[in-house]
């Protein structure tokens, strides 16, 4: 029917991103990995020359020129520089040279923008903050885990496996391995694409200095300043955590920490009415769990209107969720939590009336709770305000129609701008920002245009 088609179209557009496109480019086969929890080995990239007019050095297996993708000569080393080597050698060309574009953020927005710039003949560097944990993912959106989980759910029949006698632990272990493999392959695809177009990717924390340079700090405590003719902010977003909810990344999750779920849940409660909440409701229902979706609004169409979804499509989505076995509670918010130490004992969640904030007398008993109602831009610690980049009252970067910020030469794209918070939107914004930033020359430059 028309409504079923509308539901399928919406879910595909909202949840899927560019995995198929990346796979088609790389044609990288999925390999079975003995352990996907270990960090990736140091990634190696060639040194890139930002100016074709520079002369090559000779002797001792030194530097040589090679033709760039847009007819531009790019300088590379006969030997590959690892991140560790670059960190330890502040005189490395990789960090000391000027780049046409420095991209802060190694998600889909940043990596797509780097590709766009490189294919047009511009030198680009991607700075990717790995955080404090073991980061395997590169180039994928924050929601790549949900996409991997959704793909895995479509291939595993949990009900059948349970009927065959497999334990929940065994089933979830297989789910986790499949998700890790999907994420790792996506990272390998991204590394291979960046490497093929001579775009270095440096792991470190970037922040602007008052002089307009970017300070790059590494895990070993060292730092160095890098300079670009233009900058693109693409640091993405993080999950919003509401007060009063005992997030523990064990049984009570936000939309980022849910990737740490270590067991197959049988009863799940989710707060939210956006794309992320609906996606996880469908995924957990597919895994055979009873899912309760808690919505603040009085109706599903009203909730979906706030995220820009047409009422007819919203109604079709509502019916689809109900057909999947998802229970929807309206005009409710969560109150007190009682979380037992053992994951085998259900936790109790008190429900409140959203308008009065008083208990409704209802109590949910579930294995897992997910709060998926909002995300915050990753702008803290970047030194944006000191550099002259204006933010709104929610910390989102303000840009003009060309995606340029209030600081000349600094652009922004993706979740850092706010809703809709889709990887596909960020990719398009990143490409548009690159097109705009090189369409007209900056002051002091000889000429513009996407090619050089």
Image: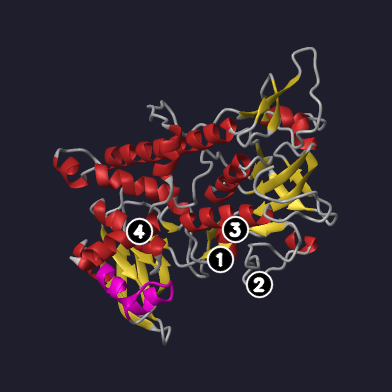
Tell me the crowding category of disc 4: few under 14, some 14 to 19, or many 20 or more residues within 10 angstroms, Cα based.
Answer: some
Give whichever of discs 2 and 1 has the lower sequence position. 2
Residue 132 visible in the displayed image: no
In the drawing, what numbered circle is on residue 392? 2
Q: Secondary structure at mark 2?
A: loop
Instruction: Give the alpha-carbon distance from disc 4 to disc 1, as whole Å.
Output: 19 Å
Give whichever of discs 1 and 3 has the lower sequence position. 3
Give whichever of discs 4 and 1 has the lower sequence position. 4
Q: What residue lies at 33% left-to-right and 59% top-to-bottom?
A: 11
Instruction: Give the alpha-carbon distance from disc 4 to disc 2, as whole Å.
Output: 29 Å
Image coordinates for residue 97, horizontal then vertical, percent: 79, 37
Q: Are marks 4 and 1 in contact (CB under 8 Å)?
A: no
Give whichever of discs 2 and 3 has the lower sequence position. 2
> Is 232 in front, or is 320?
232
Q: Are marks 2 and 1 in contact (CB under 8 Å)?
A: yes
Instruction: Give the alpha-carbon distance from disc 3 to disc 4, as whole Å.
Output: 24 Å
Residue 219 visible in the displayed image: yes
Residue holding disc 4: 279
Quadrant of the drawing holding the C terminus: top right
In the drawing, what numbered circle is on residue 131? none
Q: Which residue is outermost to the top?
A: 60
Image coordinates for residue 409, horizontal then vertical, percent: 74, 57
Give whichever of discs 3 and 4 has the lower sequence position. 4
Tell me the crowding category of disc 2: few under 14, some 14 to 19, or many 20 or more residues within 10 angstroms, Cα based.
Answer: few
What span is colored magenta in the figure? 299-317
């Amino acid at each position: 029917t028309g409504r079923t088609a509308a539901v399928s179209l919406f879910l595909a557009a909202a949840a899927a991103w560019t995995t198929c496109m990346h796979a088609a480019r790389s044609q990288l086969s999925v390999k079975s990995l003995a352990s996907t929890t270990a960090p990736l080995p140091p990634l190696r990239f060639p040194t890139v020359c930002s100016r074709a007019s520079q002369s090559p050095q000779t002797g001792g297996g030194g530097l040589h020129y090679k033709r760039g993708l847009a007819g531009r000569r790019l300088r590379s080393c006969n030997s590959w520089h690892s991140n560790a080597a670059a960190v330890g050698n502040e005189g490395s060309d990789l960090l000391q040279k000027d780049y046409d574009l420095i991209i802060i953020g190694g998600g889909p927005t940043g990596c797509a923008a780097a590709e766009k710039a490189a294919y047009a003949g511009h030198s680009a560097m991607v700075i990717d903050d790995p955080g404090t944990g073991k980061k395997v993912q590169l180039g994928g959106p924050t929601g790549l885990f949900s996409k991997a989980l959704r793909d895995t759910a479509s291939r595993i029949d949990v009900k059948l496996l349970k009927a065959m006698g497999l334990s929940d632990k065994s089933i979830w272990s297989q789910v986790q391995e499949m998700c890790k493999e999907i994420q790792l392959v996506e990272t390998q695809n991204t590394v291979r694409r960046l490497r093929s177009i001579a775009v270095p990717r440096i792991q470190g924390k970037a922040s602007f200095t008052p002089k307009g340079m970017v300070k790059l700090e590494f895990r070993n405590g060292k730092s160095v300043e890098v300079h670009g003719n233009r900058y693109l902010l693409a640091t993405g977003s993080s999950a919003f955590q509401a007060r009063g909810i005992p997030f523990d990344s064990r049984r009570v999750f936000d939309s980022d920490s849910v990737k740490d779920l270590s067991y197959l849940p049988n009863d799940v409660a989710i707060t939210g009415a956006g794309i992320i909440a609906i996606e996880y409701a469908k995924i957990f229902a597919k895994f055979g769990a009873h899912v309760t979706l808690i919505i603040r609004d009085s109706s599903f169409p009203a909730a979906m209107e706030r995220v820009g979804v047409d009422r007819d499509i919203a109604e079709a989505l509502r019916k689809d969720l109900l057909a999947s076995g998802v229970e929807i509670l309206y005009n409710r918010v969560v109150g007190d939590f009682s979380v037992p130490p053992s994951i085998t004992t259900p936790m109790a969640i008190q429900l409140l009336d959203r308008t009065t904030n008083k208990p409704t007398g209802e109590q949910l008993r579930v294995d897992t709770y997910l709060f998926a109602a909002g995300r915050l831009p990753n702008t803290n610690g970047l030194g944006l305000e000191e550099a002259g980049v204006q933010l709104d009252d929610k910390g989102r970067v303000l840009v003009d129609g060309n995606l340029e910020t209030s600081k000349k030469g600094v652009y922004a794209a993706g979740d850092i701008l706010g809703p809709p918070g889709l990887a596909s939107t960020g990719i398009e914004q990143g490409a548009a920002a690159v097109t705009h930033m090189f369409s007209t020359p900056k002051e002091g430059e000889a000429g513009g245009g996407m090619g050089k």
